[in-house]
Image (tube, helix red, strand yellow):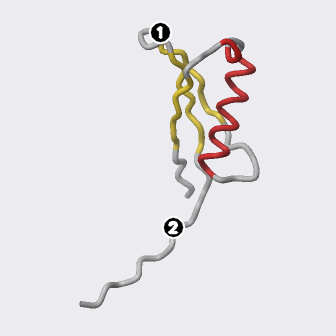
Amino acid sequence: MTSEVLKALVIVPNEKTREFGSLLAVARAEAQKREKADKNPPIRALNFVPELGIYVAIYEALDVQKPEAIPHRG
């Protein structure tokens, strides 16, 4: 069974990010940078929060294996 990990990022709109396509491009690029990935992680939602004047993008985090912990001897 695969569990899906979702992450969010905030986009503050400006003159260049007024259209939905531009906002989606910014969300994809930022998610790719955060995940240090070769391809764009899937954007699951892109919502405007009118009370704050921002957009929140929810994306699926890439499946990254965590290194095993090394026991501490002491």
| Residue found at the far front of this picture | 15
Among numbered discs 1 and 2, the one appearing first in the sequence: 1
The location of residue 4, given as percent across then percent down, is 54, 48
The location of residue 53, given as percent across then percent down, is 49, 12
Would residue 40 appear left or right of 8 to someone viewing this image?
right
Q: Identify the secondary structure beneath mark 1.
A: loop
Say few, some or many: other residues with alpha carbon within 10 Å of mark 1 (under 14 / 14 to 19 / 20 or more): few
| Residue found at the far left of this picture | 74
Q: Which mark is residue 50?
A: 1
Q: From what the image shows, is residue 54 above or below residue 3?
A: above
User: The C terminus is located in which quarter?
Assistant: bottom left
Would residue 17 appear left or right of 9 to someone viewing this image?
right
The location of residue 16, given as percent across then percent down, is 71, 16
Q: From what the image shows, is residue 23 above or below residue 33?
A: above
How far, Cα to Cα, is label 1 from label 2? Answer: 37 Å
Check disc 1 and give the amino acid type. Answer: Pro
Check disc 2 and give the amino acid type. Answer: Lys
Q: Residue at x 59, y 38 (%)?
A: 59
Pointers 1 and 2 in contact (C-beta within 8 Å) = no
The location of residue 65, given as percent across then percent down, is 56, 66
Pick whichever, 58 or 14, lies toward us.
Answer: 14
Pick whichever, 4 or 15, lies toward us.
Answer: 15
Q: Residue at x 59, y 61 (%)?
A: 64
Q: Identify the secondary structure beneath mark 2.
A: loop
Q: Which mark is residue 59?
A: none
**Which residue lies under the disc numbered 2?**
66
